Image (spheres, helix red, strand yellow):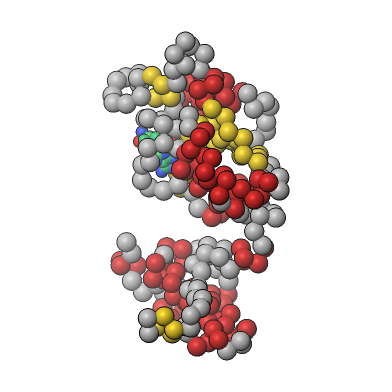
Amino acid sequence: MIFNILTLFPESFQGYMDTSILGKVIEKKIISVNLVNIRDFAYDKHRKCDDSPYGGGPGMVLKPEPLSGAIESLGKGPRRVIYLTPAGKLYNQQYAEALAKEKELVLICGKYEGIDQRIIDQYVTDEISIGDYVLSSGEIAAKVIIDSVSRLVSGVIKEESLLEESFNRGILEYPQYTRPQVFNGREVPEILITGHHANIQEWRLKKGIEKTLKNRPDLLDRVDLDENIKEYLNNITGGQSNGPNKSDRS
Ligand code: SAM
């Protein structure tokens, strides 16, 4: 998988690429990150990449020519070209799974008030927001995409680690414990030290469902939940599959 990152701040990716799991998989050539400095494609004498918005208003907008030059420098696709923007579609695990099937992605990191709309119209296939808040530039959002997508690429993380992770079955992951067995008077649940695999699996499933009901009941609105999840949910909610207190959601 190749990530082409179009950014005004390529240096901001360096520490992240050296220290995370990503560093190892880049070394193994499973993932490759191609940093493209947008400013290298600004041809005026001041290498200017931003200008004030037509129609007035505050802030600056990333000019189309340097961005177009940076995208064209990658050669012909086809490839998905993602613009990271708070005005995009909300990113989630299913989106990450879809992107992980691609061989190559282009991620455009915006800055200031964003990028000229004509770049979106001409090149962008996906406008993605990583959450309902506004960051000051797209680099952190790009790292979120690189991280969440690359751990789904074959060979990056053990398949079994992914199976029970949050969102994988439509619910959140069960609580995790490690040594010591007693910490500040709090004991590890007894079932986890019985060695009884089937009972532990069942306990984990129930705890995952309970956690989802408490923290993310919206996830339980999905119709494609496993039968055993639906059954347990029905038992604890008295048949209201998405939880007894819809109005309590925050
Ligand atoms: N004026 C824009 C708006 O209101 O939609 C916000 C621009 S923001 C200050 C600057 C850049 O940060 C954006 O172009 C985008 O690349 C990035 N960014 C900010 N919030 C983001 C989010 N929630 N998801 C993805 N990218 C984001």
Against 43, residue 115 (above or below) is below
Residue under the image location 28 percent in, 26 percent down: 58
- Screen quadrant of the C terminus: bottom left
Against 117, residue 82 (above or below) is below
Give percent across and percent down for residue 6.
Answer: 54, 31
Give percent across and percent down for residue 97.
Answer: 60, 52
**Is residue 152 shown left or right of residue 178?**
right
- Screen quadrant of the N terminus: top right
Residue under the image location 48 percent in, 32 percent down: 9
Within the displayed image, which quadrant is ligand 1 positioned in?
top left
Residue under the image location 67 percent in, 25 percent down: 75
Name the quadrant containing residue 155. bottom right
Residue 98 seen in render: no
Name the quadrant containing residue 123. top right
Give percent across and percent down for residue 79.
Answer: 65, 35
**Is residue 157 shown left or right of residue 176?**
right
Residue under the image location 52 percent in, 64 percent down: 166
Name the quadrant containing residue 2. top right
**Is residue 114 shown left or right of residue 33?**
left
